[in-house]
Amino acid sequence: MNAQETPVLSTRGLEKTFTIGGAFSRKRVRALGGVDLDIAHGEVVALVGESGSGKSTLARCIARLEQPSAGTFLFEGEDVIATSKRRATREYRSAVQMIFQDPFGSLNPVHRIGHFLERPLRIHGAASGRAEMERAKQRLMAKVGLPDEMLDRYPHELSGGQRQRIAIARALAVNPRLILADEPTSMLDVSVRIGVLNLMRTLCEEQGISMLYITHDLASARYLADRIVVMFAGEFVEGGEAMELLANPAHPYTRLLISAVPDPKRTEPFDPVERARLRREVLHPTGCQWTGKTSEPCSTETAVFHRLNEKPEHWVRCGLYAPPSDAPGTALEQPARDQENDAA
């Protein structure tokens, strides 16, 4: 992204804390811990991490389905949280659309397919009149590669892949500029996943739509995304260009994720005991959760972000990559904030 170009989405210090145990409970769980993220126009950013790492919570905060506990985020340079409620529910939701994980549950079974496309067109004023509405629905069906006759069918008459294409068409109905895709292929057969991924990639390239692609599948992230960000325990730990990050993972957690991907060339077996140990260390930290040591500097200090010398766009949040104290500093608060300083 050009340093002078305003990103389509920019979050700063975004936090989300949930209270559990009832209305009078004081127990709080931190889901997001100060997230900074920039997404450029037309860029596809993959957000990867284990279940419970905060990926969907981040997407729901961006979609304004959840209210952040702290922090700000800008959409095309405008503070979203500071805007009025009416604007947030109409204009912003028109520009930012979400594709949910479950194509079986995201479509009401009592309505025909045409209803799901007509409703957003009518609410957001994208089409008026019966003839114009029918043409708009036909264009949407053509975009996602489905025949017009499916408009009169019910969701149970379609396959999982076809239902997900309808969900994509519904998101496209209001001409969004950012799509939040939360595990859109995880419940689909392997044979149809590539078709949905190709569809999303084509739409982003042809229409300039930006996308935050949330996934557990590192193979699909490499195939679809321009950039990958790794999330753990509500915080970003590594990020960079997709092919570079997966080929040369720096953070121990990123390497742990990649070790779970089947690879016939790998000689080291996947170790579930080590993964369980890491989870225990995160819940009850006594030192660095990755090394198990308490004498290292990164065990007593909050890890900061460092850019890797070989690939400046590849950054990692880990004390193992801190430069010597007498060396030129490469640490930064967040990669996104570093870009702001460069632009200034």
Image (spheres, grey):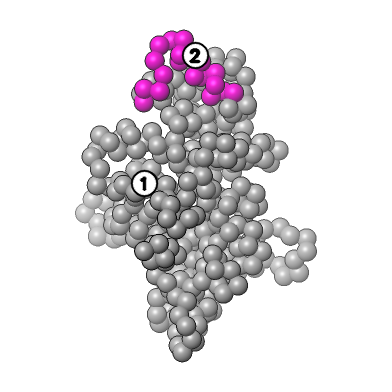
**Point 41% across, 39% down: residue:** 96
Q: Amino acid at mark 1?
A: Phe
Query: Where 56 falls versus 110 (above or below)?
Result: below
**Residue 273: x and y, percent?**
60, 69
Q: Nearer the viewer, mark 1 or mark 2?
A: 1
- Badge 2 is on which residue? 134
**Point 45% across, 80% down: residue:** 329
Q: Amino acid at mark 2?
A: Glu
Kindly report the distance in space between the C-alpha atoms of the residues bearing marks 1 and 2. Answer: 32 Å
**Element carrying mark 2:** helix
- Please tell me whether residue 278 belongs to the stretch shown in magenta: no
Q: Is residue 121 visible?
A: yes
**Residue 47: x and y, percent?**
51, 54
**Residue 343: x and y, percent?**
40, 62
- Badge 1 is on which residue? 75
Counting residues from the start of the chain, the first of labels 1 and 2 encountered is 1
Q: Which mark is residue 57?
A: none
